[in-house]
Image: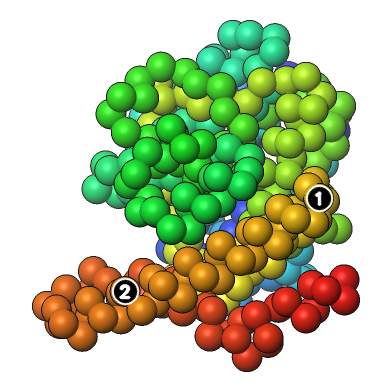
Amino acid sequence: MSGGEIEISIVILSWNTLDITTDCVESLLKFPPSRPWEVILIDNASSDGSEKILPEKYGSHPNFTVILNEKNLGFTGGNNQGIEVAQGNILILLNSDIILLDDSIVKTVDFLKSDDKYGVAGPLLVHDDGTPTTSFGFFPDFSSLFSGAFLPGSVGGLKRRALGVIPDDSMTEPLEIDYVSGAAFFIKREVIEKTGMFDAETFFAYFEETDWCWRIKKAGYKVMFFPGAKIVHLEGKSFERMTGHRRMRLYDSAKKFFRKHYSPPLLWWYMFCTVLGSILKVAYFGLRIMLQPSGKQKYLPHYHWNAFVFRLWAKGLGLAREARE
């Protein structure tokens, strides 16, 4: 990487998400940054036509570099690839399921540049209906892992310093937090030069931004939530048919994060709370579906999300393997 005339580099990673990747890029072209900018658009070995159509649509655009990978490098490897060729002093990592509504990119960039101690910033993320979704979080501890597993998500995400926080209407001012969502991740070049990039050797996807922000904060920078900018996050469209697979990957990545940064007791506490909490939620949502069939569409996603424990059960809940490791 080398700084140049480009101020803003935007890395967009796509994997079998042609339609939403196109929507993301078109929203960017509708609201382009008012500063010198570039986009590094990376296709992670898609098989849905993205590998042909994306270069045709954007390969000749003067602000775009399109990279086609022969194999899926994961979220971490793909983004690191984009970071390595980026030229801007501010780098922005955008999921392919992001939709820009206005000049939120420049708003967030200006906020990030407003203080030398700010290393990373993330905007307010919302669903396509405008309701807030998970935008940031805090590093886990014993109490937050318990509350996250056994209390409804609507119960004081900020007050209990939850691993993932959905902002509410009271959060109108910038807030120092522990990590921001990797869906819209704004970072200064100088921070990357001091802390490195995503740990692609440890993380394929999930918890990679949490790990990076851990290192960034250890280096003395602040990680900030900036509600003055709003961006739509369609949330996990590339995994929409693989809920069980997605949850298993999240669970496995979380364990890697705990092994890397915490002592074994907190890892085991995380496993205990996650498994027991999911068993209780499977029973609860299964019962709600049986007793209230009209609410099936509402409860079924929660049931499937927690039903990954059946896979764990088949593997001995992972406990025997953890003991060996």
Residue 26 visible in the picture? no
Residue position marked by numbered label 2 in the rendering = 284
> Which residue occupies the foreground of this view, 275 or 185?
275
> What residue lies at 61% left-to-right and 66% top-to-bottom?
272
- Residue 25: x and y, percent? 48, 47
Residue 207 visible in the picture? yes
- Residue 134: x and y, percent? 44, 45
> Which residue occupies the foreground of this view, 63 or 200?
200
> Which residue occupies the foreground of this view, 167 or 275?
275
**CA gap, disc 1 to disc 2?**
32 Å
- The image quadrant that residue 50 belongs to is bottom right
- Image position of 148 (left or right of 294): right
Question: Label 2 neighbourhood size at 10 Å, few (<14), some (14-19), many (20+)?
Answer: some
Q: Quadrant of the C terminus?
A: bottom right
- Image position of 94 (left or right of 81): left
- Image position of 259 (left or right of 96): right
> What residue lies at 54% left-to-right and 39% top-to-bottom?
137
The answer to which of marks 1 and 2 sits earlier in the sequence is 1
Query: Which three-letter amino acid code belongs to the residue tagged 2?
Result: Tyr
> What residue lies at 68% left-to-right and 86% top-to-bottom?
316
Q: Quadrant of the N terminus?
A: top right
Colour pattern = rainbow
